Amino acid sequence: MYANGYNNYRNDQVFVPKNNYWNRNGGGGQDYYNPYNSNPQGYMVKKNWNPNSKTDDGGLKKPNWSQITLQPFEKNFYVPHGDVQNRSESEVEAFRQKKEITVKGNNIPCPTQELTEGCFPNAVLQHLKGQGFEEPTAIQAQGWPIALSGRDMVGIAQTGSGKTLAYMLPAAVHISHQEPVKQGDGPIALVLAPTRELAQQIQTVAKEFSSALRNICIFGGTPKGPQIRDLEKGVEIMIATPGRLIDFLVNRYTNLRRCTYLVLDEADRMLDMGFEPQIRRIIEQIRPDRQVLMWSATWPKEVKQLAEEYLNDYIQVS
């Protein structure tokens, strides 16, 4: 145990060789501030942190993934519904035009036009219908089969388009097919959001539609203690703002060794707020064969560059 009472997870746990990249070097008490915004509003960046270096003041090092044996995991759970398979190419294109869906990429799955075509459990379908859902929104119709197929994806969608459920329901399916989370494990699904408000909204959706899974929302501007205690118990879904997550990774309150499903929500806004260095540092801590879903309201060159660098053979949906 560390002096602060939190578990000292062994370096040889979860497929990481001994004397490797997860050594704790230093601890709490660092000073944080936001160099990009005069009003921090809870966004925290480590002081004197050089994003171009291989390690920061707190000892967060980039793993050498070529020297780490990773346990294989399944991420393709999509079995097209019979109605989807029976639609002609012209019917699929007519639906996309009607819903103003534009797609780019290779081997793009056909959209699911009805809720029953989404490969979700009956309990989820009944809950959706109970909440007044009659059919998928455009981004859900095309996004669900892509996400369930294990593909990387860029979704260009405005607020209110239903994008949270477009990635949260597939996240629940993804998690249900992984080994159970044990105490000391990090989350399986990580959602990065630019603000505390958006992170809390995402958590509300996670609680409502994946209530069987443990989730946590971590952000700056509030005491760390309750968040740390919840992390100790183990969570399947983590929703986080970049600054507080960097803080927790540096201080070994959590890790991303189990993370196989990564969501970047409002990526354009995170970049506008200056969070690109933190996003890069966080992604470095996640195994390279992860599934990544990036969501953005716009498609500037900065977001495109991030997608080209960290997403593999991705499908773009607008």
Image (spheres, helix red, strand yellow):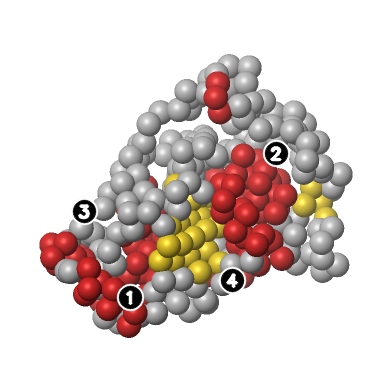
Secondary structure state at the residue bearing disc 2:
helix
Whether pointer 3 and pointer 2 mark residues with C-beta atoms closer than 8 Å, the reply is no
Q: Amino acid at mark 1?
A: Arg
Q: CA distance from mark 1 to mark 2?
A: 45 Å
Q: Relative to 308, say whether 252 is above or below.
A: above
Residue at horizontal 70 percent and vertical 35 percent from the top: 60
Q: Nearer the viewer, mark 3 or mark 1?
A: 1
Circles 4 and 2 in contact, beta carbons < 8 Å: no
Question: Which quadrant would residue 65 be assigned to in this image?
Answer: top right
**Residue 250: mark:** 2
Residue annotated with mark 1: 96
Question: In this figure, which residue is indicated by the disc labeled 4?
Answer: 298
Identify the residue at image location x=84%, y=58%.
Answer: 35
Whole-angstrom CA distance, mark 3 to mark 1, is: 20 Å
Density class for disc 2 (Cα within 10 Å; few <14, some 14-19, many ≥20) is many
Q: Which residue is mark 3?
A: 79
Residue 166 seen in the current view? no
Numbered disc 3: secondary structure: loop
The Cα atoms of the two marked residues, 4 and 1, are separated by 20 Å
